Image (spheres, rainbow, N blue to C red):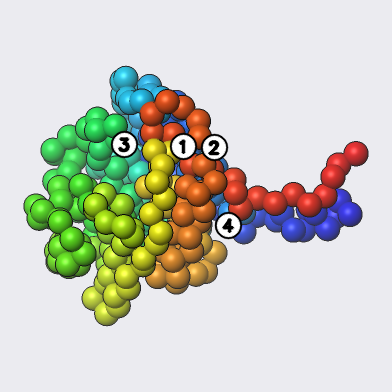
Amino acid sequence: MLKDLLIKLKLKSKILVIAGSDSSGGAGIQADIKTITSLGSYAMTAITAVTVQNTKGVKSVASISPNEIQNQITFSAQDIKPDAIKIGMLHSKLVIKKVLVSLKKLKTKKIVLDPVMVAKGGARLIDKEAVKLIKNDLIQKVSLITPNIPEAEVLTGCKIYNKEDMVFAANELIKLGAKNVLIKGGHLNARKVTDIFLNKSDFKIFTSKRYKTNNTHGTGCTLSSAITTFFSCGKSLKRACELGIKYVNLSILTNPKYGKGHGPVNHIHSIEIKKKFK
Protein backbone atom coordinates (compact mmCIF):
# COMPACT_ATOMS: atom_id res chain seq x y z
CA MET A 1 0.00 0.00 0.00
CA LEU A 2 2.77 2.45 0.95
CA LYS A 3 4.68 1.56 -2.25
CA ASP A 4 1.62 2.33 -4.38
CA LEU A 5 1.20 5.69 -2.66
CA LEU A 6 4.84 6.59 -3.22
CA ILE A 7 4.53 5.81 -6.93
CA LYS A 8 1.37 7.90 -7.18
CA LEU A 9 3.07 10.89 -5.53
CA LYS A 10 6.23 10.78 -7.64
CA LEU A 11 7.42 14.28 -8.56
CA LYS A 12 6.86 15.20 -12.21
CA SER A 13 9.28 18.08 -12.78
CA LYS A 14 11.59 20.64 -11.15
CA ILE A 15 10.75 24.34 -11.19
CA LEU A 16 12.82 27.32 -10.08
CA VAL A 17 10.78 30.30 -8.87
CA ILE A 18 12.33 33.77 -8.83
CA ALA A 19 9.96 36.01 -6.86
CA GLY A 20 9.22 37.94 -3.68
CA SER A 21 8.00 36.56 -0.37
CA ASP A 22 4.52 37.26 1.04
CA SER A 23 4.38 37.00 4.83
CA SER A 24 0.60 36.40 4.70
CA GLY A 25 1.17 33.26 2.60
CA GLY A 26 -1.38 34.03 -0.10
CA ALA A 27 0.85 35.32 -2.89
CA GLY A 28 4.50 35.40 -3.95
CA ILE A 29 6.91 32.57 -3.21
CA GLN A 30 4.50 31.00 -0.72
CA ALA A 31 1.71 30.74 -3.30
CA ASP A 32 4.19 29.49 -5.90
CA ILE A 33 5.47 26.66 -3.70
CA LYS A 34 1.96 25.60 -2.71
CA THR A 35 0.76 25.58 -6.31
CA ILE A 36 3.74 23.72 -7.74
CA THR A 37 3.66 21.15 -4.93
CA SER A 38 -0.09 20.55 -5.15
CA LEU A 39 0.27 19.92 -8.89
CA GLY A 40 2.95 17.32 -8.30
CA SER A 41 6.22 19.08 -9.03
CA TYR A 42 9.27 20.22 -7.06
CA ALA A 43 9.82 23.91 -6.27
CA MET A 44 13.14 25.69 -5.76
CA THR A 45 13.27 29.39 -4.94
CA ALA A 46 15.30 32.56 -5.35
CA ILE A 47 13.72 35.23 -3.16
CA THR A 48 13.97 38.76 -4.57
CA ALA A 49 12.31 40.68 -1.74
CA VAL A 50 10.63 40.16 1.62
CA THR A 51 7.28 41.88 1.99
CA VAL A 52 5.52 42.54 5.28
CA GLN A 53 1.83 42.22 4.51
CA ASN A 54 -1.50 40.71 5.43
CA THR A 55 -4.82 40.45 3.64
CA LYS A 56 -5.46 44.17 4.25
CA GLY A 57 -2.32 45.48 2.57
CA VAL A 58 1.47 45.79 2.33
CA LYS A 59 3.30 47.41 5.25
CA SER A 60 6.85 47.30 3.88
CA VAL A 61 9.13 45.77 1.26
CA ALA A 62 12.74 44.77 2.04
CA SER A 63 14.89 44.15 -1.03
CA ILE A 64 17.35 41.28 -1.25
CA SER A 65 20.81 42.13 -2.61
CA PRO A 66 20.92 41.62 -6.40
CA ASN A 67 24.14 39.60 -6.00
CA GLU A 68 22.46 37.30 -3.49
CA ILE A 69 19.50 36.84 -5.81
CA GLN A 70 21.89 35.77 -8.57
CA ASN A 71 23.68 33.45 -6.14
CA GLN A 72 20.40 31.81 -5.13
CA ILE A 73 19.55 31.17 -8.78
CA THR A 74 22.88 29.85 -9.98
CA PHE A 75 23.87 27.87 -6.88
CA SER A 76 20.53 26.04 -6.68
CA ALA A 77 20.45 25.32 -10.42
CA GLN A 78 24.02 24.01 -10.46
CA ASP A 79 22.87 21.18 -8.21
CA ILE A 80 19.26 20.64 -9.34
CA LYS A 81 18.70 21.69 -12.95
CA PRO A 82 15.21 23.17 -13.37
CA ASP A 83 12.89 21.97 -16.13
CA ALA A 84 11.22 25.37 -16.12
CA ILE A 85 11.50 28.79 -14.47
CA LYS A 86 8.74 31.04 -13.17
CA ILE A 87 9.63 34.71 -12.62
CA GLY A 88 7.53 36.95 -10.41
CA MET A 89 8.39 40.13 -8.52
CA LEU A 90 11.49 41.91 -9.86
CA HIS A 91 11.44 45.32 -8.19
CA SER A 92 14.53 47.07 -9.56
CA LYS A 93 16.73 47.46 -12.64
CA LEU A 94 19.71 45.89 -10.87
CA VAL A 95 17.71 42.81 -9.90
CA ILE A 96 16.50 42.32 -13.48
CA LYS A 97 20.05 42.64 -14.82
CA LYS A 98 21.26 39.92 -12.46
CA VAL A 99 18.34 37.69 -13.42
CA LEU A 100 19.15 38.17 -17.11
CA VAL A 101 22.77 37.15 -16.50
CA SER A 102 21.58 34.09 -14.57
CA LEU A 103 19.11 33.04 -17.28
CA LYS A 104 21.84 33.23 -19.89
CA LYS A 105 24.00 30.87 -17.83
CA LEU A 106 21.21 28.40 -17.06
CA LYS A 107 19.91 28.10 -20.64
CA THR A 108 16.53 26.83 -19.41
CA LYS A 109 14.13 27.12 -22.34
CA LYS A 110 10.76 27.10 -20.56
CA ILE A 111 10.34 30.43 -18.75
CA VAL A 112 7.11 32.11 -17.62
CA LEU A 113 7.14 35.78 -16.56
CA ASP A 114 4.43 37.19 -14.31
CA PRO A 115 5.30 40.92 -14.29
CA VAL A 116 4.23 41.70 -10.73
CA MET A 117 3.88 45.47 -10.40
CA VAL A 118 1.03 46.30 -8.03
CA ALA A 119 -0.22 44.44 -4.95
CA LYS A 120 -3.91 43.56 -4.63
CA GLY A 121 -4.37 46.43 -2.17
CA GLY A 122 -2.83 48.94 -4.61
CA ALA A 123 0.77 49.21 -3.32
CA ARG A 124 3.40 49.75 -6.06
CA LEU A 125 5.98 46.92 -6.09
CA ILE A 126 8.29 47.96 -8.96
CA ASP A 127 10.09 51.12 -10.15
CA LYS A 128 10.00 52.79 -13.59
CA GLU A 129 13.52 51.76 -14.60
CA ALA A 130 12.65 48.13 -13.91
CA VAL A 131 9.54 48.41 -16.11
CA LYS A 132 11.67 49.80 -18.95
CA LEU A 133 14.15 46.90 -18.72
CA ILE A 134 11.31 44.34 -18.70
CA LYS A 135 9.94 45.90 -21.90
CA ASN A 136 13.28 46.27 -23.67
CA ASP A 137 15.02 43.05 -22.69
CA LEU A 138 13.46 40.50 -20.33
CA ILE A 139 10.20 40.12 -22.24
CA GLN A 140 12.16 38.80 -25.22
CA LYS A 141 13.89 36.09 -23.17
CA VAL A 142 10.80 34.29 -21.83
CA SER A 143 8.36 31.78 -23.29
CA LEU A 144 5.23 33.47 -21.92
CA ILE A 145 4.31 36.72 -20.20
CA THR A 146 1.13 36.81 -18.06
CA PRO A 147 0.19 40.43 -17.19
CA ASN A 148 -3.13 41.42 -15.70
CA ILE A 149 -4.87 44.47 -17.16
CA PRO A 150 -3.09 47.15 -15.05
CA GLU A 151 0.28 45.52 -15.82
CA ALA A 152 -0.52 45.27 -19.54
CA GLU A 153 -1.45 48.96 -19.51
CA VAL A 154 1.89 49.88 -17.92
CA LEU A 155 3.87 47.76 -20.37
CA THR A 156 2.06 48.94 -23.52
CA GLY A 157 0.91 52.43 -22.63
CA CYS A 158 -2.61 51.44 -23.78
CA LYS A 159 -5.79 51.84 -21.75
CA ILE A 160 -7.83 48.63 -21.59
CA TYR A 161 -11.60 48.87 -21.21
CA ASN A 162 -12.83 45.74 -22.97
CA LYS A 163 -11.91 42.46 -24.68
CA GLU A 164 -10.92 44.21 -27.92
CA ASP A 165 -8.48 46.42 -26.01
CA MET A 166 -6.99 43.29 -24.43
CA VAL A 167 -6.35 41.80 -27.87
CA PHE A 168 -4.77 45.06 -29.05
CA ALA A 169 -2.49 45.21 -25.98
CA ALA A 170 -1.50 41.56 -26.46
CA ASN A 171 -0.45 42.36 -30.02
CA GLU A 172 1.55 45.34 -28.75
CA LEU A 173 3.41 43.01 -26.38
CA ILE A 174 4.16 40.69 -29.31
CA LYS A 175 5.61 43.71 -31.16
CA LEU A 176 7.85 44.34 -28.12
CA GLY A 177 9.28 40.85 -28.57
CA ALA A 178 7.06 38.61 -26.46
CA LYS A 179 6.74 35.10 -27.91
CA ASN A 180 3.43 34.30 -26.19
CA VAL A 181 1.07 36.50 -24.16
CA LEU A 182 -1.73 35.72 -21.71
CA ILE A 183 -3.55 38.88 -20.61
CA LYS A 184 -5.71 38.22 -17.56
CA GLY A 185 -9.06 39.99 -17.62
CA GLY A 186 -10.13 39.75 -14.00
CA HIS A 187 -9.97 43.55 -13.55
CA LEU A 188 -12.63 44.21 -16.19
CA ASN A 189 -16.10 44.99 -14.89
CA ALA A 190 -17.89 42.12 -16.59
CA ARG A 191 -20.12 39.20 -15.64
CA LYS A 192 -17.59 36.68 -16.99
CA VAL A 193 -13.80 36.68 -16.68
CA THR A 194 -12.06 36.76 -20.05
CA ASP A 195 -8.38 35.84 -20.51
CA ILE A 196 -6.66 36.33 -23.87
CA PHE A 197 -3.88 34.02 -25.15
CA LEU A 198 -2.04 35.20 -28.25
CA ASN A 199 1.10 34.65 -30.27
CA LYS A 200 2.00 35.32 -33.92
CA SER A 201 0.13 32.28 -35.19
CA ASP A 202 -2.45 31.39 -32.54
CA PHE A 203 -5.25 33.07 -30.60
CA LYS A 204 -7.53 31.81 -27.86
CA ILE A 205 -10.14 33.38 -25.58
CA PHE A 206 -10.70 31.66 -22.23
CA THR A 207 -14.00 32.53 -20.55
CA SER A 208 -14.64 31.69 -16.90
CA LYS A 209 -17.37 32.24 -14.34
CA ARG A 210 -16.78 35.18 -12.01
CA TYR A 211 -17.15 34.31 -8.33
CA LYS A 212 -18.38 36.99 -5.91
CA THR A 213 -15.62 36.96 -3.30
CA ASN A 214 -12.88 39.16 -1.87
CA ASN A 215 -10.64 36.12 -1.50
CA THR A 216 -8.55 36.39 -4.64
CA HIS A 217 -5.18 37.39 -3.17
CA GLY A 218 -2.33 35.78 -5.08
CA THR A 219 -4.33 34.58 -8.09
CA GLY A 220 -1.74 36.00 -10.51
CA CYS A 221 1.16 34.24 -8.80
CA THR A 222 -0.88 31.07 -8.52
CA LEU A 223 -1.88 31.09 -12.19
CA SER A 224 1.62 31.68 -13.53
CA SER A 225 3.03 28.92 -11.32
CA ALA A 226 0.28 26.52 -12.39
CA ILE A 227 0.98 27.31 -16.04
CA THR A 228 4.71 26.82 -15.49
CA THR A 229 4.06 23.45 -13.84
CA PHE A 230 1.85 22.14 -16.65
CA PHE A 231 4.28 23.55 -19.24
CA SER A 232 7.25 21.88 -17.51
CA CYS A 233 5.46 18.52 -17.72
CA GLY A 234 5.11 18.64 -21.49
CA LYS A 235 1.81 20.44 -22.08
CA SER A 236 1.69 23.05 -24.85
CA LEU A 237 1.60 26.65 -23.61
CA LYS A 238 -1.99 27.14 -24.71
CA ARG A 239 -3.08 23.93 -22.97
CA ALA A 240 -1.02 24.85 -19.90
CA CYS A 241 -2.84 28.20 -19.77
CA GLU A 242 -6.22 26.45 -20.02
CA LEU A 243 -5.37 24.00 -17.23
CA GLY A 244 -3.84 26.76 -15.10
CA ILE A 245 -6.99 28.88 -15.40
CA LYS A 246 -9.15 25.92 -14.36
CA TYR A 247 -6.88 25.30 -11.36
CA VAL A 248 -7.15 28.93 -10.24
CA ASN A 249 -10.93 28.99 -10.70
CA LEU A 250 -11.29 25.99 -8.39
CA SER A 251 -8.86 27.60 -5.95
CA ILE A 252 -11.09 30.67 -5.79
CA LEU A 253 -14.29 28.61 -5.56
CA THR A 254 -12.96 26.65 -2.57
CA ASN A 255 -11.17 29.56 -0.85
CA PRO A 256 -10.82 29.23 2.95
CA LYS A 257 -12.21 32.71 3.77
CA TYR A 258 -9.18 33.74 5.83
CA GLY A 259 -8.38 37.32 6.80
CA LYS A 260 -10.30 40.60 6.93
CA GLY A 261 -9.24 41.95 3.52
CA HIS A 262 -8.28 40.30 0.24
CA GLY A 263 -8.02 36.71 1.46
CA PRO A 264 -6.05 33.82 -0.08
CA VAL A 265 -7.31 31.10 -2.40
CA ASN A 266 -7.19 27.36 -1.74
CA HIS A 267 -3.99 26.12 -3.36
CA ILE A 268 -4.36 22.52 -2.23
CA HIS A 269 -7.79 21.71 -3.67
CA SER A 270 -6.10 19.40 -6.17
CA ILE A 271 -4.59 17.20 -3.46
CA GLU A 272 -6.66 14.15 -2.61
CA ILE A 273 -5.50 11.66 0.03
CA LYS A 274 -7.48 8.46 -0.12
CA LYS A 275 -5.38 6.33 2.20
CA LYS A 276 -5.30 6.52 5.97
CA PHE A 277 -2.03 6.07 7.82
CA LYS A 278 -2.16 4.12 11.06
In the rendered image, residue 90, in percent from the top left (x then y), is placed at: 29, 39
Whether the residues at callouts 4 and 1 have beta carbons within 8 Å, the answer is no
Marks 4 and 1, the one that precedes in the sequence: 4
Nearer to us: label 3 or label 2? 2
Marks 3 and 2, the one that precedes in the sequence: 3
Q: According to the image, label 4 marks what residue?
A: 13
Q: Is residue 187 above or below residue 93?
A: below
Residue found at x 41% / y 42%? 213
Whether the residues at callouts 2 and 4 have beta carbons within 8 Å, the answer is no
Residue 120, label in figure: 3
Q: For residue 263, what is the image quadrant?
A: top left
Q: Measure the C-alpha gap from mark 4 to mark 3.
A: 30 Å
Q: Which residue lies furthest to the bottom in this view?
A: 201
Marks 2 and 1, the one that precedes in the sequence: 2
Residue 65 is at least partly visible in this image: yes
Q: Is mark 3 on a helix, strand or loop?
A: loop
Q: Measure the C-alpha gap from mark 3 to mark 1.
A: 11 Å
Residue 77 is at least partly visible in this image: no
In the rendered image, residue 237, in percent from the top left (x then y), is placed at: 41, 68
Q: Measure the C-alpha gap from mark 2 to mark 1.
A: 7 Å
Q: Measure the C-alpha gap from mark 2 to mark 4.
A: 28 Å
Residue found at x 24% / y 33%? 122
Q: Given the image, on which type of amino acid does mark 3 rest?
A: Lys
**Quick one: 66 or 24, which is closer to the camera?**
24
Q: Work out which quarter of the rendered image holds the N terminus and state it.
A: bottom right
Q: According to the image, label 2 marks what residue?
A: 256
Nearer to us: label 2 or label 4? 2
Q: According to the image, label 1 marks what residue?
A: 264
Q: Measure the C-alpha gap from mark 4 to mark 1.
A: 25 Å
